Amino acid sequence: DGGITQSPKYLFRKEGQNVTLSCEQNLNHDAMYWYRQDPGQGLRLIYYSQIVNDFQKGDIAEGYSVSREKKESFPLTVTSAQKNPTAFYLCASSIGQGGGYEQYFGPGTRLTVT
Amino acid sequence: KNEVEQSPQNLTAQEGEFITINCSYSVGISALHWLQQHPGGGIVSLFMLSSGKKKHGRLIATINIQEKHSSLHITASHPRDSAVYICAVQAPMNYGGSQGNLIFGKGTKLSVKP
C-alpha cells in the first residue's frame, strides 16, 4: 500500500530536549511538507522540500530543522529553541511542490513537551 | 488577518440533512482544496478545484472565482460524515513564507446525529 507514515503517534519530551519526528513516504513524490496544528487554528507550514537535498522555510520555521537526504524521508527536529513545541504535527507529500497539487497526509504525531 | 475564512465554525445536523460549508478567501489563487480531518487527526483530500464544480458520491464542491468563495455540500448526511472539514487555498508565489503553498482555514467541525 502506498502512503505516508509518521512515527510515533504520541511523543512526550522534557523541556530543553531536542526531538525528531519521522516522516516516510513510498508514493515516489518529489515534494514533502511539515505542518503544525494547534487547537482552533488552521494548519501552518513549517518547512517544505521540493526535491532531495533541498528544503525551504515556511511560515513558522523558527525552532525547527529538517533534512531531505532521501526522496522517501523528511524528518523534522523540534529543537529546544522552539518556544511552544506542544502541538500536533502533520507531514504531507505531493507529486510537485505547491498548492496546485493534491497533497497526501500522514496520520500525524502529537508532541507533548513538559 | 485570516486569508481563508470558513463558516460555520461548528455545525450539528440530523442524519439525512443537506449540509453546506462555506469558504471565503482574500488572496488570489490558482487552486482551492477541501480536506477532511477525522477525529484521530488523519487528513484526507476530498477535492482540488480551480473553477466550476466537482462531485464525488454525496459530496459536491463549487467555486466562484469572481466572488472568491467556495462551498462544500454533503447530501443525505450520515453520522460517518462527522469530521472537521478544512478549506485551503494556494498562496501566490511571493506571499510570505507560503510561496505557492497552501494557506488553511481553521476548519468546520461537523457532527451528524443519528
Image (cartoon, coloured by chain):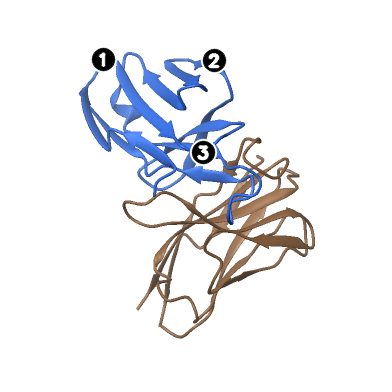
Residue on which disc 2 sits = B52
Marks 1/2: CA–CA distance: 25 Å
Q: Earlier in the sequence, mark 1 or mark 2?
A: 1
Amino acid, disc 1:
Gly
- In the rendered view, would you say B63 is above or below B105? above
The subunit letter for the residue under badge 2 reads B
Asked if marks 3 and 1 touch (Cβ < 8 Å), the reply is no
Task: Name the residue beneath numbered marker 3.
Answer: B27
Where disc 2 sits, the SS reads strand
Circles 1 and 2 in contact, beta carbons < 8 Å: no
Q: Where does residue A5 sit, x and y in percent of width and height?
A: 59, 52
Q: CA distance from mark 2 to mark 3?
A: 18 Å
- Secondary structure state at the residue bearing disc 3: loop
Same chain letter for marks 1 and 2: yes
Query: Disc 3 to disc 1, how far (Cα)?
Result: 35 Å
**Does label 3 lie on the same chain as label 2?**
yes
Q: Position of residue A77 (x, y in %)?
A: 58, 72
User: What is the secondary structure assignment of the residue under circle 1?
Assistant: loop
> Would you say the residues marked 2 and 3 are in contact, meaning their CB atoms lie under 8 Å apart?
no
Nearer-N-terminus badge (2/3):
3
User: Can see residue B54?
Assistant: yes
Residue B114 appears anywhere in the view: no
**Foreground label between 3 and 1:** 3
Instruction: Give me the residue at 73% from left, 45% from top.
Output: A29
Q: Residues within 10 Å of mark 1 (few under 14, many from 20)?
A: some
The residue pinned by badge 1 equals: B16
Chain B representation colour: blue
- Judge whether A110 appears above or below A5 on screen: below
